[in-house]
Amino acid sequence: MTKTIRALMMLAAVVSMAGSAQLAQAASATAGQPVYKSKCQMCHSADGSGNLPKAKANPLGGPTVQAKSDADLKKAITAGTGTMKPVAGVAGADLDNVIAFMRSLKK
């Protein structure tokens, strides 16, 4: 019985640590803002409403963009979409953080 309890306690500790690691890796809108400012703001504006006609037609905080999955947004950023060219130098955690920032613009 004691071995079973010890095993269960160890399993609970491992599960708890795994959950904490996932939280530590969660995307951050705060960390994404400076990347957005340097890579995206010139076309999409500080608030995501758009500086260019096509960006204004689909603001980042609007329902069309917000309905896209994170995977779709990653593809648009890294591969480009429509008249938008791929954004160089945004990958990994920066990419996740920029998407988190974009989500924070939801109207």
Image (tube, grey):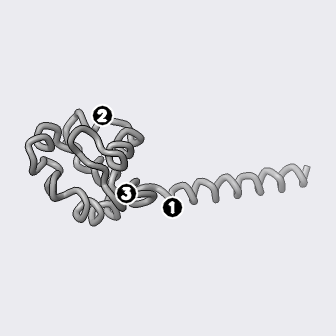
Front of the two marks 2 and 1: 2
Give the left or right position of residue 80, taking residue 16 as reference: left
Query: Which badge, 2 or 1, is on the more N-terminal residue?
Result: 1
Q: Is residue 25 left or right of residue 12?
A: left
Report the side of 21 relative to 47 (left or right).
right
Residue position marked by numbered label 2 in the rendering = 67
Looking at the rendered image, the quarter that the C terminus falls into is: top left
Distance CA(mark 2)–CA(mark 1): 26 Å
To which residue does mark 1 refer? Answer: 24
Q: Residue at (51%, 61%) from the top-left corner?
A: 24
Q: Residue at x 40, y 54 (%)?
A: 96
**Callout 2 secondary element:** loop
* Nearer the observer, 30 or 42: 42
Q: Are marks 2 and 1 in contact (CB under 8 Å)?
A: no
Q: Amino acid at mark 2?
A: Ala
**Cα distance in 3D space between marks 3 and 1:** 13 Å
Residue 71: mark: none
Q: Residues within 10 Å of mark 1 (few under 14, many from 20)?
A: few
Residue 88: x percent and y percent?
Answer: 33, 58
| Mark carried by residue 97 | 3
Q: Identity of the amino acid at label 1?
A: Ala
Q: Secondary structure at mark 3?
A: helix
Q: Secondary structure at mark 1?
A: helix
- Choose between 61 and 74: the one closer to the eye: 74
| First of labels 3, 1 by sequence position | 1
